Amino acid sequence: DVKVTQSSRYLVKRTGEKVFLECVQDMDHENMFWYRQDPGLGLRLIYFSYDVKMKEKGDIPEGYSVSREKKERFSLILESASTNQTSMYLCASSLAGIGNTIYFGEGSWLTVV
Amino acid sequence: GENVEQHPSTLSVQEGDSAVIKCTYSDSASNYFPWYKQELGKGPQLIIDIRSNVGEKKDQRIAVTLNKTAKHFSLHITETQPEDSAVYFCAASRGRDSSYKLIFGSGTRLLVRP
């Protein structure tokens, strides 16, 4: 089974803190994603990576950055956390190519106070 | 910009009844339409998908239909069971051959009453 593991399920951070959300996948997938999930808004793509050190902005990249130094690991960074970044963050991965299933992790609940 | 609209936002059905969730998309080049189920405390999981060269696809109690002309697609769950209770998301690819970049609907919370 594909496993996408998000190391932190629940975090509480203060405004202005730098926050790291880590994600690891064990299926040698080329593509990795970070989504944000908010009630009534569905899932919105923050960043996408198709290879090591490669990244593309999604729909809502402002206030976020990412790092992919190894194929299996994709990190989301909030440089200076703000209260409007309180949300559920979902990491996902898939093989390259058309129509391959995107597998999601269980999510990281971030509260910024 | 591209978007996917999903209705209804909540749906309550009696066990054994059918449930239908509908989505419309705006990008006429979209050609891949997956449906995800998210149970409480878990990440979304793919339950069925359909490509634009097919009008209908079925997998046991779940079916998806696609009307490319009208740009809408629907999820049909028959003989619903309590374990079908979850949030369901539809999604559409951004343009042709971009199935790795999806636009998601806002979700439907399905409650199946025993």
Image: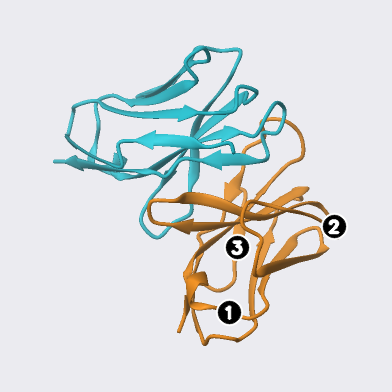
Tell me which numbered mark, 2 or 1, is placed earlier along the sequence.
2
The residue labelled by disc 3 is: A5
Q: Which of marks 2 and 1 is in front?
A: 1
Q: Which residue lies furthest to the front in this view?
A: B1
Indicate which disc, 2 or 3, sits on the residue closer to the N terminus.
Answer: 3
Image check: A8 left or right of B62? right
Chain bearing mark 3: A
Q: Could you say which disc has been placed on residue A52 in the image?
A: 2
Residue carrying label 1: A81
Q: Which amino acid does label 3 sit on?
A: Thr
Real-space Cα separation, disc 2 to disc 1, in angstroms: 25 Å
For chain A, give the colour.
Answer: orange
Q: Looking at the image, is mark 3 or mark 1 nearer the viewer?
A: 1
The quadrant of the rendering that contains the N terminus of chain B is top right
The residue marked by circle 2 belongs to what chain? A
Q: Quick one: which chain is cyan?
A: B
**Residue B25: where, in percent of width, then height?**
51, 29
